[in-house]
């Protein structure tokens, strides 16, 4: 029930509505452009992070890409079943597994990168080229400025032991 004197909020004036829709569109475009690879945006993020930060543990990977630790296990299971990622025991603590890309994982990243770039170009195509960098900077500011509100805050890079 609306309070007397309060104004109804139209969903199409809310940034959250547009962010949700853009996320849906982004995933759809990613899946179209990478269709032949059978990989999701989250799996791609995990593979990319493992290339950038080899031999990190699952928990650190989750924090690096902003994913909750209960979800990352399934992501790694699927990547491991496709022989894209390998779990190895950590020498300093045998209870911990570190993750590495297999040669198949490295090859997949190399092969998929042009398709991912094409997806990103499609997402940004309604903007003028001169707006691309500014838009990415604005997204970065919003994500990093609100990072702690996430149920899975991300780290900018893995913390070294």
Image (spheres, rainbow, N blue to C red):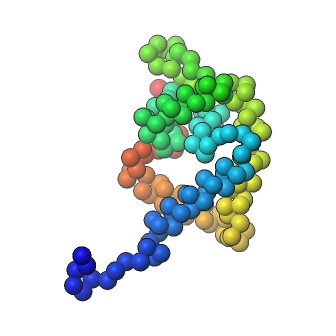
Q: Nearer the viewer, residue 81 or 144?
A: 81
List x then y, in percent, for residue 39: 65, 40
List x then y, in percent, for residue 93: 45, 15
Q: Residue at x 21, y 84 (%)?
A: 4
Q: Residue at x 72, y 39 (%)?
A: 37
Displayed quadrant of residue 14: bottom left
List x then y, in percent, for residue 68: 43, 40
- Residue extending farthest to the front is 1
Q: In the drawing, does residue 27 fall left or right of residue 57?
A: right
Q: Residue at x 27, y 83 (%)?
A: 6
Q: In the drawing, does residue 113 fall left or right of residue 9?
A: right
Displayed quadrant of residue 137: bottom right
Q: In the drawing, does residue 109 fall left or right of residue 147?
A: right
Q: Residue at x 37, y 77 (%)?
A: 9
- Residue extending farthest to the left is 4
Position of the N terminus, as image quadrant, is bottom left
Does residue 157 sit above or below 98 in this rendering? below
Q: Is residue 1 visible?
A: yes
Displayed quadrant of residue 49: top right
Does residue 15 sit above or below 152 in this rendering? below
Does residue 51 sit above or below 126 in this rendering? above
Q: Is residue 155 visible?
A: no
List x then y, in percent, for residue 17: 47, 67
Q: How many marks?
A: 0
């Amino acid at each position: 029930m609306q309070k007397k004197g309060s104004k109804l909020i139209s969903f199409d004036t809310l940034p959250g509505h547009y962010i949700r829709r853009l996320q849906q569109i982004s995933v759809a475009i990613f899946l179209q452009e990478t269709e032949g690879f059978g990989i999701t945006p989250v799996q791609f993020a995990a593979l990319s992070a493992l290339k950038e930060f080899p031999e990190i543990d699952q928990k650190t990977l989750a924090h690096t890409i902003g994913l909750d630790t209960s979800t990352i296990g399934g992501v790694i299971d699927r990547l491991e079943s496709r022989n894209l990622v390998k779990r190895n025991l950590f020498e300093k603590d045998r209870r911990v597994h570190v993750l590495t890309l297999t040669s198949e994982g490295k090859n997949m990243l190399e092969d998929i990168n042009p398709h991912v770039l094409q997806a990103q170009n499609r997402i940004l195509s309604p903007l003028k080229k001169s707006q691309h960098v500014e838009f990415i900077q604005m997204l970065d500011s919003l994500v990093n400025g609100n990072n702690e509100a996430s149920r899975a805050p991300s780290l900018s890079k893995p913390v070294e032991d």
